[in-house]
Image (cartoon, rainbow, N blue to C red):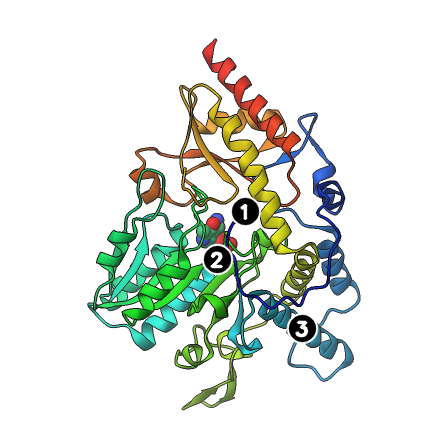
Amino acid sequence: MVTEMSSSRPKIDPPRPAFDVERIRADFPALRQTVHGRPLVYLDNAASAQKPSRVIETVRRYYTDDYANVHRGLHYLSERASDAFEAARGKVRAFLNAREDREIVFVRGTTEAINLVASSFGQAHLKAGDEILITEMEHHSNIVPWQLLGERLGTVLKVAPVNDAGELLMDEFERLLGPRTRLVAVTHVSNALGTINPVERIIELAHARGARVLIDGAQSAPHAAVDVQALDCDFYAFSGHKLYGPTGIGALYGKRELLESMPPYQGGGEMIREVSFTRTTYAELPFKFEAGTPHIVGAIGLGAAIDYLREIGLDAVARHESELLDYATPRLREIPGLRLVGTAARKAGIASFLLDGVHTHDVGTILDRHGVAVRAGHHCTMPLMTRFGVSGTTRASFALYNTRAEIDVLVEAIRQAQELFRR
Ligand code: PMP
């Protein structure tokens, strides 16, 4: 869904065949079904993406043939599972172009990654009066952890506003970036509006003032190449389930020296070196942050999703989704009484809209009767909805397997929803 997140990722991927959306669709069994007698048109990708056979088969195979706990057993299966689990970490490292595998911490998803940083970075580096700067377009998972931290430590949350198009007001952002700002936590791409934030500039400005930067990559990782070294962000978080991988798995990237300076997030097995009742020492990175049995098969499935995406090529994915947005936008605008919410100049494949006289939930329900899956509501961005004076929107979000024909179905279904309420 991201259109122009260029990076200086080394070109190590082999040459690929041309992007063929029909061939890609054939990789996703879920797309073959009908819903209410109509072919499924799945446009709820910003919430969660469907899974290619490669991922489903990898997960099935690991549960069937290769399953064991990791890092503990000396037996054959455990060693195989450990190797596959660590290989998956290597795939995430390469995907983000991180320097070292130990900079990749497996977590449940973006939410857990941000909570980990809030708790652990907070404990090590923040004190009462220190400021955390976010934006008005953050997902609740990049708001609430900072509020919880504020309740615990007395840190102060600052919020940079957006304009009517849903673009971050950079002047305001710079003004709010003060001498007490210790951390900037910002989404790369807005899940509610599609806005692509100028994270390169944000990171540059924050670093110049001595603040660390966390990028919420939930909506950027699946849709364009991300290079954490080129970005120079301090933390980057993403979720596997939006990246065509399993649910319950995601990753936090953190610069090594920073992760080393932070205490464990949770205690338990896997994260220790030695335990006694008086003193416990902790394992090396990344295990220090991975207490308990991890989501082994989730991580391996995520590795398969990354392999799949890299074979297609993130640049081709970004191009395809950008074309879908360019196709959809004027067609949606032509619908009388439809208002797009989020019209940033740099936008990912997300179309959020309001329809005169029809409640967003009714739009969602009627579209569902046409087989079109969209999301209706606040998209876990209540403060942003308040900023736009609405309680929610209907949101169509595009992925690599969507087509122009599906957008035609969406547009026609919206027109019919409108007709129904006009009568
Ligand atoms: N940030 C953004 C921008 C998101 O879109 C989402 C998911 N909607 C999250 C964070 C949270 O991701 P998860 O629920 O996978 O932890």
Give whichever of 399, 83 is nearer the camera. Answer: 399
Q: Position of residue 265 (x, y in %)?
A: 43, 73
Label 2 to label 1: alpha-carbon separation: 12 Å
Callout 2: SS:
loop
**Which of the two labelled residues, at mark 2 and mark 3, occupies the earlier sequence position?**
3
Res 399 seen here = no
In the image, what residue occupies the spot 58% across and 38% down?
A: 324
Residue 42 vs 258, above or below: the answer is above
| Mark positioned earlier in the residue sequence (2 or 1) | 1
Residue 385 can be seen in this image? yes
Amino acid tagged 3: Ala
Within 10 Å of disc 3 (Cα), the crowding (few <14, some 14-19, many 20+) is some
**What residue would you read off at disc 2?**
217
Under circle 1, the secondary element is loop
Spot the residue most to the right.
Answer: 65
Q: Is mark 3 on a helix, strand or loop?
A: helix
Direction from residue 407 to residue 344 in the image, left or right: left
Which amino acid does the dot numbered 2 rest on?
A: Gly
Q: Residue at x 74, y 40 (%)?
A: 22
Residue extending farthest to the top is 423
Residue designated by label 1:
1
| Residue identifier under label 3 | 87
Discs 1/3, front: 1
